[in-house]
Image: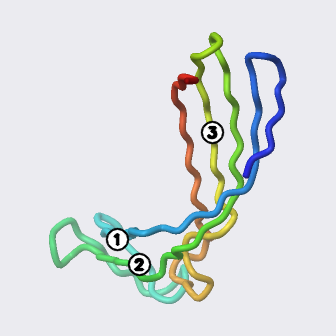
Amino acid sequence: IQATYNVSKKVRLKAGPYFSYVMSNDFSGYAYDGYLREGDPTGQKVELGHDDGERGDYDFTDDLRHWQFGVDVGADWYFSKRVGAYADLAWGLSAIFHKRFKTIEQKLYPIYGSVGLMYKL
């Protein structure tokens, strides 16, 4: 659902909420060529190398949320009666990880942008 406001015959602003269900997701990888601290920032230093077995592998896929919600804002600009362009920004208000997930201290939020051309039939 979006509310729209026509600034002029050629420009339309739009905003509204979005709800989505993520069917397939992945948050995995590895850290390398650095170090981590155990427990707290002054804890035991753990070196991470570059080769297999020396890297810090992680997979947080099972901790990702499937349901997400946020706000979508954008603008449409018509070059002519039928042809135009649009730009949208969707900003998630729900963090990508479940509340019980504590490995990454900062909350991460999804942000998506899109631009494109449109043709009115």
Q: Identify the residue at horizontal 41%, vertical 78% (top origin).
A: 60
Camera-near label (1 vs 3) is: 3
Q: Alpha-carbon distance for marks 1 and 2?
A: 6 Å
Q: Is residue 54 above or below residue 3?
A: below
Q: State left or right for residue 90 relative to residue 117.
A: right
- The kind of secondary structure element at disc 2 is loop
User: CB of mark 1 within 8 Å of CB of mark 2?
Assistant: yes
User: CB of mark 2 within 8 Å of CB of mark 3?
Assistant: no
Task: Tally the marks.
Answer: 3
Q: Nearer the viewer, residue 81 or 44?
A: 81
Q: Alpha-carbon distance for marks 2 and 3?
A: 29 Å
- The kind of secondary structure element at disc 1 is strand
Which residue occupies the extreme front position in the image?
Answer: 121
Q: Earlier in the sequence, mark 1 or mark 2?
A: 1
Residue 16 in the image: x percent, y percent? 75, 50
Q: Identify the residue at horizontal 29%, vertical 76% (top origin).
A: 57
Instruction: Name which residue type carries label 1.
Output: Ser
Q: Identify the residue at horizontal 57%, vertical 81% (top origin).
A: 98
Dot 3 crowding, Cα within 10 Å, few <14, some 14–19, many 20+: some
Q: How is the image coloured?
A: rainbow
Residue 88 in the image: x percent, y percent? 63, 39
Which residue was labeled with disc 1? 28
Q: Identify the residue at horizontal 40%, vertical 76% (top origin).
A: 61
Dot 1 crowding, Cα within 10 Å, few <14, some 14–19, many 20+: few
- The kind of secondary structure element at disc 3 is strand
Instruction: Name which residue type carries label 2.
Output: Phe
Which residue was labeled with disc 2? 60
Q: Earlier in the sequence, mark 1 or mark 3?
A: 1
Residue 101 in the image: x percent, y percent? 55, 84
Which residue was labeled with disc 3? 88
Q: State left or right for residue 49 relative to residue 98.
A: left
